[in-house]
Image: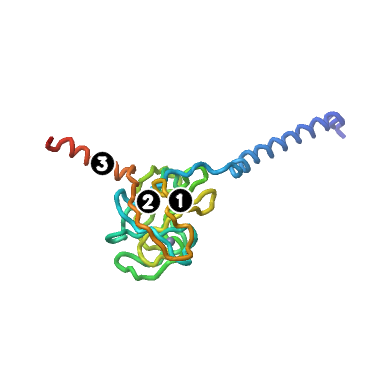
Amino acid sequence: MVPSRQLTPVRRRVVAAVLGLGVVAVVVLLVGVYAVPVLRPPGPRPAFQLPVACGEKWQVGTYPGHDDFDIDLFPDKGQAWGRPVLAAAAGTVVEAGISGTLGGRTPQNPDGPRGTSGGYWVKIDHGGKWETLYLHMLEPPSVRRGQRVEQGDQIGKVGSTGKSGAPHLHHEQLRAGEKVETHFAGAPSGITTDDREYSVTLTSRNCAGAASRATAGKRNAGEKSGPVG
Ligand SMILES: [Zn+2]
């Protein structure tokens, strides 16, 4: 028996109170860390631009069985294979890899075995609970998870990996995890349902990225050094 180590009833109550406060503090912390961000409403829509090169014209459309709000992009002219896929807005890459199976559709073998799901894909978190998806890329994405991207930065190339019939870019915009109507240059695409086949032609105004800055730089330098008048 060690009487000196036994707690008096008063001390026992103090210890219980301290433990109780500790539990309350942990619960408050967990609620703060997990529940508050979940409950916070989404922020304003980022100023998304078409996720393809500045100035290019693309057919933006959908078809029955696609999924509401999902869009597919095919170039208005020329080959889709290998065209740059650009970040629709600035953000952080949260996925960059393979979704499903790649299949075997390549520029050399466009009718090769079809894969499943998204193939080589990227997901960008734009903050304010807004995210964008880019599927079926030709090669492993040129960005990695955790990387910060600016609007117009190249994240990959157009391909036909995954469940894809022909080379194209599949794109989605999500608000709080739910697909919403895609917007480009501040205007809604008009694609809200996959009830019928539908497409619109849009010109990319995604002109702020590194590639466009380099081209503009060259253009400006050329103008300065060129003949005057
Ligand atoms: Zn699609």
Local packing at callout 3 (Cα closer than 10 Å; few below 14, some 14-19, many 20+) is some
How far is disc 2 from disc 3 in space, using C-alphas? Answer: 19 Å
How far is disc 1 from disc 3 in space, using C-alphas? Answer: 26 Å
**Mark 3: amino acid:** Ala
- Marks 1 and 3: CB-CB under 8 Å? no
* Residue 102, percent from left and from top: 41, 63
Q: On the picture, is 59 further left or further right than 29?
A: left
Can you see residue 142? no
Q: Which residue is mark 3?
A: 216
Callout 3: SS: helix
Q: Which mark is residue 51?
A: 2
Q: Which residue is mark 1?
A: 132
- The residue under the point 38% across, 53% down is 141
Sequence-wise first label, 1 or 3: 1
When the figure is inspected, residue 71 is found, relative to residue 49, above or below; the finding is: below
- The residue under the point 49% across, 62% down is 67
- Marks 1 and 2: CB-CB under 8 Å? yes
* Residue 169, percent from left and from top: 38, 58
